[in-house]
Structures are given as C-alpha cells and as structure tokens.
Amino acid sequence: MLSEDGKQLVYTQKSRLFRTWKRYRGGTAPDITLFNLDDLSSEVIIDSDANDEIPMWSGNKIYFLSDRGDEMRANIWSYDLTSKSVKQLTSFKDYDVHFPSIGPKDIVFEAEGKLYLLNLATEEITDVKVT
C-alpha cells in the first residue's frame, strides 16, 4: 500500500493467509517491509516469527494482521512510524480477524461471523449492524 504522499510503499513479500495450517512460526512467516520509492531503500519494520500480513497505511501508522499475541489468533495491530512501537488493537481469543480493509476513518473487518469497525482516531471497536 502506498503512503499518502506516494513516496513509500509498505508490503509483504509472501503470504500465509490461505494456508491450511495456522499459528505457524518459522522462516516462511511473512514480515512487513517499508520501501522508499525515492532512494530505492527498504527496511523490514515488522520482523517476527509470527504471521504479519495485510499492511494498511493511515497517517503515521501501519495497521496489520498478526497472530503474535498470547492468544495466537489473527488480530489487528498497529506500528507507529515515529516511535517504532507495536500495539495490539483487537483481542479476539476464539476466532481470527479476517479481511480487514482500511478507509479514511475506519478499518472494517470480520471476526466471529460478524462485521466490525475499528475507528482509527479513537481505536474503539463497534459491531456493524447488518439488517
């Protein structure tokens, strides 16, 4: 995904999203890389033995899926580009988060068979009422 100014790209080189084995730890677990389109430099910003996937850029943060937490479920995390800190934003324990998609104010995602919104400004999660 491109930064808002179009000068950087955040991506994963590989994916484990549709593999049949979950909670994999090891050498083919995806990492998240930041690529500078001006000087062609790159930096791995999310590097762990967990599965880190689907980077989404908003402002000064990269949002992504990861199963790195204690529950070992895919949840949404954020990476602050200034402080380089990682923070867990959702804490689903029984089901993985699936198919997050970022918009200007929210990330919509599925978990537990329901749709949710993660507000980017407040980091609050709300159920989407489907009628």
Image (tube, rainbow, N blue to C red):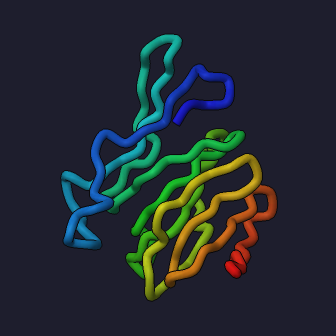
Q: Quadrant of the C terminus?
A: bottom right
Q: Residue furthest front?
A: 131
Q: Residue at x 67, y 23 (%)?
A: 5
Q: Is residue 114 left or right of residue 33?
A: right
Q: Residue at x 19, y 53 (%)?
A: 27
Q: Quadrant of residue 60?
A: top right
How many marks do you count on the picture? 0
Q: Is residue 24 left or right of residue 106?
A: left
Residue 38 is at least partly visible in this image: yes
Q: Position of residue 116 (x, y in %)?
A: 64, 73
Q: Position of residue 102 (x, y in %)?
A: 62, 51
Q: Position of residue 49 (x, y in %)?
A: 30, 59
Location of residue 92 with respect to 12 vertically, above or below: below
In this view, the residue in front, 121 or 50, is 121
Q: Residue at x 48, y 11 (%)?
A: 39
Location of residue 57 with respect to 38 vertically, above or below: below
Q: Residue furthest bottom?
A: 94
In this view, the residue in front, 74 or 116, is 116
Q: Is residue 59 left or right of residue 77?
A: right
Q: Position of residue 122 (x, y in %)?
A: 80, 63
Q: Quadrant of residue 119?
A: bottom right
Q: Residue furthest right?
A: 122
Residue 86 is at least partly visible in this image: no
Q: Residue at x 20, y 52 (%)?
A: 28
Q: Is residue 22 left or right of residue 123?
A: left
Q: Quadrant of residue 107?
A: bottom right
